[in-house]
Amino acid sequence: MDCTIQWLPASGMAFVAETGSGHLITMDGAPDGGGRNLAPRPMETLLAGAGACSAYDVVLILQRGRHPVAGCQVKVTSERAATDPKVFTRIHLHFTVQGAVPEAAVQRAVAMSHDKYCSATVMLAKTAEVTTSFEVRAD
């Protein structure tokens, strides 16, 4: 994998990343750091990527198990160190799975992502305590 990040000087502290797959991601800084608050912060993007990586695993595992998963949402919350480098120290992922999916299947899928498959959360666990929880909504 690779990507190229380009600073956009006219916008203050905004950056555009072009991924190896040809997609663009825009990021910006907070106004107190010279940004204009036009896009997510780089660390927010990192957290969103970790949540999406794990959600991808959970949905795929449930689909492969032939469970009727109709939706999956992940709410990611975090804490960061107070001093530089302000690494993530705690990350919690709460999954809400929709469909007539057995709780045991969701628990297994979340655990498999957390313990084995999600490269992003496994990597972030080097500095952060990563925890998970879930709920199933049949509606």
Image: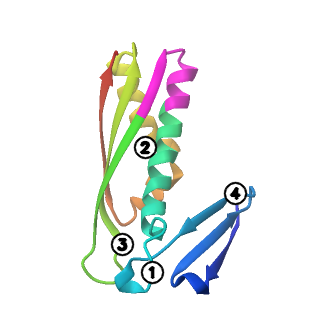
- Write down the residue under mark 1: 35
Label 3 secondary element: loop
- First in sequence: mark 1 vs mark 2: 1
Residue 114, horizontal then vertical, whole percent: 41, 43
User: Can residue 58 be found in the magenta stretch?
Assistant: no
Marks counted in the figure total: 4
- Please tell me which residue is depicted at 27% across the width and 74% down the height of the picture: 81
- First in sequence: mark 2 vs mark 4: 4
- Write down the residue under mark 3: 87
Q: Which of these two is toward me, 111 or 76?
A: 76
Q: Bin the neighbour count of mark 1 within 10 Å (Cα to Cα): few under 14, some 14-19, many 20 and up.
A: some
Label 2 secondary element: helix
Q: Are marks 4 and 1 in contact (CB under 8 Å)?
A: no
Residue flagged by tag 4: what amino acid is it? Answer: His
Q: Bin the neighbour count of mark 2 within 10 Å (Cα to Cα): few under 14, some 14-19, many 20 and up.
A: few
Foreground: disc 3 or disc 4: 4
Distance (Cα) linking label 3 and label 4? 26 Å
